[in-house]
Image (cartoon, rainbow, N blue to C red):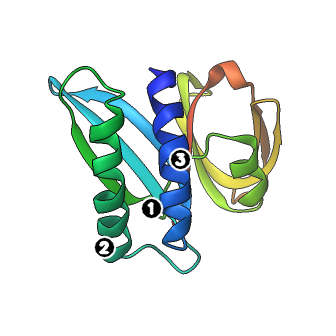
Amino acid sequence: MSKITDLVAEMARPIVAAQGCELWDVEFVREAGEWFLRVYIDREGGVSIDDCEAVSRALDPLLDEADPIEQSYNFEVSSAGVERQLKRPSDFERFMGSYIAVKLYKAVDGAKEYLGYLRGYDNGNVTVETKAGDMRTFESAAVASVHLRME
């Protein structure tokens, strides 16, 4: 499915930029038996509903014309959100020092989620400093997801 998301990202990037926003992510997922194409946008100071609507109205006809997805799907444009997922190395660089939640595939010391400040990112390995001051580094293979968190 990454081909679909890559193609949609290429189509969306100039439309999103024209609205003064940046493209955060594109996902194509199946939930409750239905397919969803989601375009996440970001903007300094936050994304408004008007931003989402403008991107949706401009991108929707292009998607219809290019027809990159064979099956029927629901199309959504939304803000990346304050508790967005960090995926790319540039995301980790941008939010270094921010408060995050690291979710693990398997429990480590009895926990599958660790909260703390992002202190390092190296080739998928994530280093977190807890509020108690403990430093923990999680190998990339153990990390299910990393999200920003509100303190």
Q: Which mark is residue 151?
A: none
Can you give x and y, in whole percent of width and height, for residue 3 in the image?
A: 50, 23
Q: Report the Cα–Cα distance between label 2 and label 1.
A: 12 Å
The residue located at (54%, 81%) in the rendering is 45
The residue under label 3 is 85
Q: Position of residue 134 (x, y in %)?
A: 78, 49
Quadrant where the image shows the N terminus: top left
Amino acid type indicated by mark 1: Gly
Give the Cα separation between the discs numbered 1 and 3.
9 Å
Q: Position of residue 97 (x, y in %)?
A: 76, 62
Whether residue 69 sits left or right of residue 86 in the image: it is left
Q: Quadrant of the C terminus?
A: bottom right
Q: Is disc 2 placed on a helix, strand or loop?
A: helix
Closer to the camera in the image, 141 or 34: 34
Residue carrying label 1 = 81
Question: Residue under circle 2?
Answer: 49
Q: Residues within 10 Å of mark 3 (few under 14, many from 20)?
A: many
